[in-house]
Image: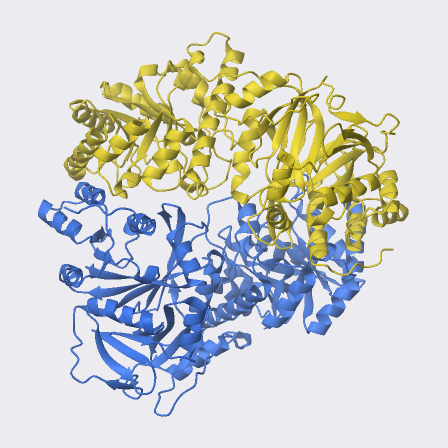
Chain colours: A blue, B yellow
Amino acid sequence: MQRSIATVSLSGTLPEKLEAIAAAGFDGVEIFENDLLYYDGSPREIRQMCADLGIAITLFQPFRDFEGCRRDRLARNLERAERKFDLMQELGTDLVLVCSNASADSVGDEQILVDDLRLLAERAGARGLRIGYEALAWGRHVNTYQQVWNIVRQADHPSLGVLLDSFHTLSLKGDPSAIAEIPGEKIFFVQMADAPILAMDVLEWSRHFRCFPGQGEFDLPGFLAPIIKSGYTGPLSLEIFNDGFRAAPPRANAADGLRSLLYLEEKTRQRLAEEAPSTGNADILFATPPASEYNGIEFLEFAVDDNLGAKLSHWLERLGFVKAGQHRSKNVSLLRQGDINLILNTEPYSFAHSFFEAHGPSLCATAVRVKNSASALERAVAYKGQPYRGLVGPNELELAAVRAPDGSLIYLVDQEADVYGTDFNLQPGAVIGAGLKRIDHMAMALPADSLDSWVLFYKSLLDFEADDEVVLPDPYGLVKSRALRSRCSSIRLPLNISENRNTAISHALSSYRGSGVHHIAFDCDDIFAQVSRAKEAGVPLLDIPLNYYDDLAARFDFDDEFLSELAYFNVLYDRDAQGGELFHVYTEPFEGRFFFEIIQRKNGYAGYGAANVAVRLAAMAKSRSGGLRHAKL
Amino acid sequence: MQRSIATVSLSGTLPEKLEAIAAAGFDGVEIFENDLLYYDGSPREIRQMCADLGIAITLFQPFRDFEGCRRDRLARNLERAERKFDLMQELGTDLVLVCSNASADSVGDEQILVDDLRLLAERAGARGLRIGYEALAWGRHVNTYQQVWNIVRQADHPSLGVLLDSFHTLSLKGDPSAIAEIPGEKIFFVQMADAPILAMDVLEWSRHFRCFPGQGEFDLPGFLAPIIKSGYTGPLSLEIFNDGFRAAPPRANAADGLRSLLYLEEKTRQRLAEEAPSTGNADILFATPPASEYNGIEFLEFAVDDNLGAKLSHWLERLGFVKAGQHRSKNVSLLRQGDINLILNTEPYSFAHSFFEAHGPSLCATAVRVKNSASALERAVAYKGQPYRGLVGPNELELAAVRAPDGSLIYLVDQEADVYGTDFNLQPGAVIGAGLKRIDHMAMALPADSLDSWVLFYKSLLDFEADDEVVLPDPYGLVKSRALRSRCSSIRLPLNISENRNTAISHALSSYRGSGVHHIAFDCDDIFAQVSRAKEAGVPLLDIPLNYYDDLAARFDFDDEFLSELAYFNVLYDRDAQGGELFHVYTEPFEGRFFFEIIQRKNGYAGYGAANVAVRLAAMAKSRSGGLRHAKL
């Protein structure tokens, strides 16, 4: 498909936007009128700039409040249109978006609307230009694509066609299926926008909260599928009004935009294949190897130096990890417990070392187990992921890898691969099976404006799913969390952001100089046994106020002895509506950086203990500010 | 009145909140349960802390989902209540907020609700505690104060009373007038919250967008007046759920909260006086001298050093200003034109100098003309404004002054005062009457989270009015603007914020190291004559793209000659719905700091040219990035 984006979707001056659009790999651009008005160069110069960059101007937009205008204004409005037609010819584009009249004094008489638009189409047609007529969700009389098609059909002019915008239909809960019945050649243009479902004024929603496909909650494959069925082969364009995008770096944002279109095309292709295997022209849609099946996390690799490596190793040993191997030729060691493999990398002149230099002690790589690493990498690259090839020494296993948005690595490891045997001298007698069994989840701290970009990355390259956003109070602001999951939930990745500068998330970010993992949760079968052992071994646990346990007593029917045990071990508790239970405990941070969580899920509890995040954040704020510890029980 | 605030309204740990509340001068505090749960100290310790700070615990809140709960849960819920009553007795507060049941499975049978609440009141009464029953706007069956009063009346228990919250009534467009008919002693507590009018889900609106009285759009005097008429004499408390407040410095925010209550009391007192001069107990409300009448700006004082003072003086002279006087003993000069007086202060060891040291070249004082400076100052101080007394030399006039939120001074000058004769050697022959007549407005750049605080400052201390917020696009993000006006509009002060770091507003802020005036608009009668003179004198004007004028041609019926003139002089144009017209032109910034605007209003145009702000911001962005100038016409 021809992929396009409206200039209004990006931040910057017009040349900055056009350069970003070309660099991302779009084929075309919609010129939003204001971007042109505010630019200190002629339309011809813009035309040349686009030609030099290799992008077509797919659309000029918008032309407002035309059809059904007050009769005494019609002549003046036609004159206004002719001036814009002049401009379009200078720009070198043949299509203009005319959106349905939203003014209070416009008339709704269908014949007048038909006649006005036919008149405009004749004027346009005389110059070889075309009109795409769009229903605004807040149009005074016309606000559905069905009305638009009805009017376009009656006007019956070759220069007048339908312009579709997913937001205007889906925001009003419209059913897009009848689009399939419009002849494809009468659809002149398609704009795609996603959005979170918000109960608010539709105009405000549209102007501030749109987002790229896959970042919101609309069923966009359900909108695009009937368009493909209609036989439409024109541009697929993004028109995104978003307050954050208006300030985001345009190059990275444009790259996300292109990725979002590819993702939408893949999902639409799947939808069409489910409906009827041989639907129309589905082959014009992006195709890529399907996502892998996942089987959890193979290993995590930490970037540290010698000093911190020894400290972290000691920390982990107190948590029950055992030194299970040493790299044959590098300063890299392996710690193991249950199904958990942790690699501490202190090798100089390595990727880990440069990551350590940039971010301090941090997680520099995550290896996920996949069914087929070659096809997983192919998919990631098709989605514009950046593959990584490190230096591979003799007798070292080469692993497929792609860069995460923070520059860390995601290794794609075949699940049968012998990952450690080649590179490591393994400790034959090491007792591996202690109480922590597997990595339950890893939580990331991200800059506030990058959440959508991360969600799209994981959804497209790795085919992860995203849970709904949860908003949680920190004593110094709000924290927002959105969890990503592999489809079988064997990998879980809550992403956390905060717009306020003194929250735990913002502290984690400034300490990392960038985004990074800020806590890792290990699963176990007996929380009290594990915490008791950790406590004895000297693992510093996060102190939870007694008042929290008084409230648990009011909320749940616990006996005093059990409550005392929870409080003694600083164990937090949650219960979901289905009776699933969560027990979890947090450590203090390692070197003020990441911390660990020990977790036990019962009866299918699927969440992350959101009910307890506020008390944890308050305890962490107190711990940051070096508050006095009170003796417990 | 007893003035109170809920802990949830402020950021920080519980001790930080309590200290801020006491420091602001509140009499009491509502303890929001979560603040207690997350605090690592016992309820008795909190009680002692409040006693030491001299604030009463006016309320414990909330107790949820009690009345009409599923019958099999009633006993368990009563047990839960008893545990919370224990807690209240340790805290030393006798009143708990019970909000109407919001759970889907609660029952609405009125007799059950009455019986449940009577039962709870009996349990509470047995311990000398009281229940305040509140209607949540999203309560499942009970969501109006009328229903609450009906139930409380039927339950007829001395320990059960009505709890009122302005948000829950006004968000549902409820009529508060019937509150006057509830016996005052049956109203146990009153919570006040303002909010912007938003078309969104009421629960989300309530949890994230409340603000202090005077910062939003609710008619709060209309809510408080019937409460006063009822004979209520209990606490007036602020319960503000606001995302920004959760991260704002608690001391400054608590001070704003107290100021907002005083403002609400003054406005309510006025409302009651209008209705019936001798209403009930209106005397318990805050009283202060009424606001002054204003007659424009007397002078503006700039803090500069010798070098920049000379440069600015030269700049202003090119704009038609004349050196009209020199201070008798200080390095301070006066420039004049029409009714505009500008003071350039380069005196070392002065307030201006310390302001210059902190902020660079900037506006350090604004003198407003008032009818009675003594009463204006008294009012400002009653509203907790910080009065300023500078060093006054021999033969110098002493002016009343109060600090603005950015630390600059607002002089309150009697309109008949001879402000300059005492301090200055005036130039007898100076020709004063050139083309610029008066200061039309001064625009400020503020940190994004301080807008509400400034609005409240001007509304309360100076009795200004605030226009609605306008959102405007900068190429690198959004800018929000809210204009303040003295009641006769002789002083206008648009306040601008931006949450994005590369916008013009954010650049102004970082260049000022704090908030500050970023442009000053001068009024004239003939824009073309003034701009022509300025251009000739070498004033650098902000270059406006020709495309802007092409669009003007499409929108308005101008002849080509007039359009060419507008374009040649870089004059922007706007027309309002009533036919009012605005012509305005901007200079480039002085030393990258503030810039000037020349403005002509016709036919009662009252705005600030919002339609042209985007093109101005784009031109400024281009100018900042040092883009090439294109030859014009």
Q: Nearer the viewer, residue B81 or B148?
A: B81
Query: Residue at coordinates 53% horizontally, 77% vertically from top-left?
Result: A283
Give the percent coordinates (x, y) of residue A284: 55, 76
Query: Residue at coordinates 15% horizontally, 38% vertically from top-left?
Result: B76
Give the percent coordinates (x, y) of residue A435: 16, 68
Q: Nearer the viewer, residue A623 or B545?
A: A623
Q: Nearer the viewer, residue A470 or A420?
A: A420
Residue A89 position by quadrant: bottom right
**B577 displayed left or right of A321:** right
Give the percent coordinates (x, y) of residue A424: 28, 85
Give the percent coordinates (x, y) of residue A252: 55, 66
Residue B11 position by quadrant: top left
Query: Residue at coordinates 64% horizontally, 41% vertically from top-left?
Result: B356
Q: Residue furthest top?
A: B278
Q: Is residue B43 visible?
A: yes
Q: Residue furthest right?
A: B561
**B420 displayed left or right of B375:** right
**How many marks can you see?**
0
Image quarter of the C terminus of chain B: bottom right
Image quarter of the N terminus of chain B: top left
**B144 displayed left or right of A564:** right
Q: Nearer the viewer, residue B421 or B183?
A: B421
Query: Residue at coordinates 24% horizontally, 18% vertically from top-left?
Result: B156
**Above or below for A566 versus B481:** below
**Above or below for A192 versus A373:** above
Q: Is residue A290 visible?
A: no
Residue B100 position by quadrant: top left
**Above or below for B553 versus A364:** above
